Amino acid sequence: MNRITRAIGIETSKLAARALTADESAALSRALNMSFEEYCVLQELKSLAFSERRFNLEEAETLYGILGGIPEHFNRQPIAAKIVCTQIFMELLTIARKGLTTHGG
């Protein structure tokens, strides 16, 4: 188990404790859906983070498995996985904005 799968387990427990209705779950899932542009940025940031050793190989593979090859794959993931990926996305964007992640752009 890696940090990402542990975080998903924690989020799953939190969601179960909240006992969301079907409508609340559907609304939350839709709110966490990712656009094509967001998906591309997260894939790039994930790869950069791995190359900078912020993620180990297992964590990078876990993220890739959740993200899949197209945004629609991510958008079909369980809510807990979407929450964790969204949190990671925010953290990676913060690091990138602070100039700690560089690339030849």
Image (tube, rainbow, N blue to C red):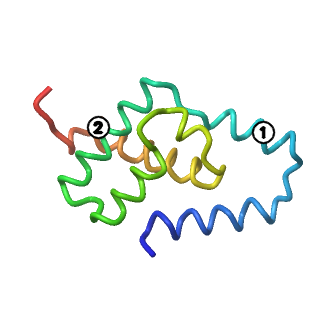
State if disc 1 and disc 2 touch (CB < 8 Å).
Answer: no
Q: Nearer the viewer, residue 77 or 87?
A: 77
Q: Name the residue located 66 percent from the left edge and 49 percent from the top edge.
A: 79
First in residue order: circle 2 vs circle 1: 1
Q: Name the residue located 58 percent from the left edge and 47 percent from the top edge.
A: 82
Q: Whole-percent x and y of residue 7?
A: 54, 65
The type of residue carrying mark 1 is Ala
In the drawing, what numbered circle is on residue 51?
A: none
Q: Secondary structure at mark 1?
A: helix
Which residue bears the numbered disc 2?
A: 44
- Residue extending farthest to the bottom is 1
The type of residue carrying mark 2 is Glu
Q: Name the residue located 28 percent from the left edge and 63 percent from the top edge.
A: 57
In the drawing, what numbered circle is on residue 26?
A: 1
Q: Nearer the viewer, residue 72 or 34?
A: 72
Q: Name the residue located 16 percent from the left edge and 39 percent from the top edge.
A: 102
Q: Tag 1: Cα neighbours inside 10 Å, few (<14), some, or many (≥20)? A: few
Left or right of 79, for residue 26:
right
Q: Tag 2: Cα neighbours inside 10 Å, few (<14), some, or many (≥20)? A: few
Quadrant position of residue 72: top right
Left or right of 101, for residue 46:
right
Q: Secondary structure at mark 2?
A: helix
Mark 2 and mark 1: Cα distance apart in space: 28 Å
Quadrant position of residue 8: bottom right
Q: Is residue 12 above or below residue 88?
A: below
| Image quadrant occupied by the N terminus | bottom left
Q: Whole-percent x and y of residue 91?
A: 40, 47
